[in-house]
Amino acid sequence: MVHGIGDERDGARPGVDGLPGGGLNIAHEAADRHVARGRGDRVALRCPGRDGTVRTVSYAELSGLSGRFAGLLHRLGVERGERVFTLLGRVPDLYTAALGTLKAGCVLSPLFSAFGPEPVRTRLAAGDGRVLVTTRALYRRKVACLRGSLPGLRHVLLVDGAADGDEGPGTVALHPALAAADPDTPCAPTGPEDMALLHFTSGTTGRPKGAVHVHGAVVGHLATARHALGLGADDVFWCTADPGWVTGTSYGIVAPLAAGATVLVDDGEFDAERWYAILRDHRVAVWYTAPTAIRMLMKAGAAVARRYDRPALRVIASVGEPLNAEAVTWAQDTLGLPVRDTWWQTETGAIMIACAVDAPVRPGSMGRPEPGIEAAIVTRTPGGGVRVADGPGTVGEIALRAGWPSMFRGYLGDEERYRRCFADGWYLSGDLGVRDADGCFRFVGRADDVIKAAGHLIGPFEVESVLMEHEAVAEAGVIGVPDPIAGETVKAFVTLKAGHTPSEALARALIGHARARLGPAVAPRALEFRDALPHTRSGKIMRRLLKARELGLPEGDLSTLEGNGDGRR
Ligand code: ATP
Ligand code: MG
């Protein structure tokens, strides 16, 4: 049976147990309750090493390790509500630290380990980080030089530290400290409204914002993992997102553990052969990835895919960027399964709209709102309210009826901006979409990226999707450039698949293809080839950067631009 957010079971919170003495804590749902239910020997984490060995961590071990971590935080005098940051790849210690932080009643903020020193500093300062969990090498390269400017950062826990103080004052060797701590340290008696997670947005449209989430979010994580992704307790689940992004935490840590599944923990970079081998060798059943990753697999070619079987794979889903129809059908033809789209944001905390496992896949459509979620297409009225679109077919902003469990509870330090996200009881997402007669939503574009050309409202995604239909195109990014007559005209940047080379003739052919499919008003006027497009570290095309570079404007915050850290872990 599938439990939606609105279902009633075992009291008010379906699917979660709650703390034995009352209250709710994500760490209890993700580890301790499985032990209490006699499932402690089940594998929680399955961690393939580079040398071919596989380390596993059971739920009982995870429960004990996170208890020890919470005990260590208590010993260090870290108080409830204080912030613990992680700067780690996907290693077992990440899960210990994440759940241990929540168990102690502290707030977890995972950072992307490839960030350079400046993005690390700004986030630690904005979030008032009290503790940082990282490796010696990362600490030396990125944090040691900043300690002077971060007086609030009292403790640095080093997962490979040998002895306390080795790397200077305030550094603690994590493993010896854990060995000395109590595995049965009890879970802090948090409630559903207590702050649990601090996530920074991807910075696709500007400076990243810090979104505040609460323990109650686990209700949404669990319900959507079951309903949208079809995840069950016997499944091996692989989420390719880094924990530095909301997907890598909500669905890389919390949701699968709350579901009692086995999390495949892989810290490697993208490599088509290796990825196919993981799907095969570890019998992955549910795979949550991103459109960019699917497009990279397409670029690598179907022949690679055919060399590997996928004995347990049941569901492929993606998030983060528009999923072009071409990618859905390619996966169906090549991998034997379609890609199911899911739409959500850092702010929404969990999947909101999805092509759920019990629904037919319609390439190009994102699907329907998850159970318990009310979504609508709205337009903002001059008086500061919203008008809900009467019928299907209207382009407008995707809005969600406020109050779902995983909804963010604030932007860190920016109450005014948070307030502006809501009107008439709706949360306004800043994304544009259309709803069809069957209640399915289609993505049009981010409000910031939409192009207004000669009276037409053009979503870049529509144009990009059509360009990606062409056999030569690997990826496309589309922007509007100012035009004295039309207001804006459409310009495309394109990367090519292996075996194709840029030429005037190919540019003309691509524009011709787009004109035939979209009409001259919407098709690009200009097209340039690029070796690569700028992406955020979470895999989104940074259209604002394409535009700034095209127009010679300031490039803005580039802290999340891929390849902009020091690149090394
Ligand atoms: P910032 O808010 O800092 O500009 P961001 O919006 O990219 O960054 P995230 O919260 O990581 O930060 O991403 C959410 C956004 O990603 C959504 O608002 C939407 O634009 C895009 N997105 C997510 N899922 C989908 C999807 N299935 N289809 C289309 N776009 C999606
Ligand atoms: Mg955003």
Image (cartoon, rainbow, N blue to C red):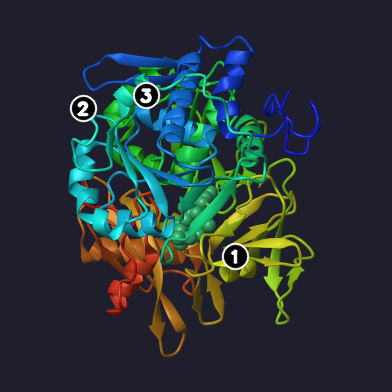
Question: SS class of the residue under badge 2?
Answer: loop
Dot 2 or dot 1, earlier in sequence = 2
Q: Quadrant of the C terminus?
A: top left
According to the picture, the residue beneath numbered tag 2 turns out to be: 162
Q: Position of residue 65 (x, y in %)?
A: 43, 22
Pinpoint residue 544: horizontal percent, then vertical percent: 38, 68
In whole angstroms, how far apart are the C-alphas of marks 2 and 3? 12 Å
User: What's the mark number on residue 178?
Assistant: 3
Q: CA distance from mark 2 to mark 1?
A: 43 Å
User: What number is the disc on residue 328?
Assistant: none
The answer, for residue 568, to whether it is visible in the render is: no
Earlier sequence position, callout 1 versus callout 3: 3
Q: Nearer the viewer, mark 1 or mark 3?
A: 3
Q: Which image quadrant for residue 504? A: bottom left
Badge 2: residue crowd in 10 Å (few <14, some 14–19, many ≥20)? some
Residue position marked by numbered label 1 in the rendering: 418
The crowding category of the residue bearing disc 1, from other C-alpha atoms within 10 Å (few below 14, some 14 to 19, many at least 20), is some
The answer to which of 502 and 200 lies nearer the viewer is 200
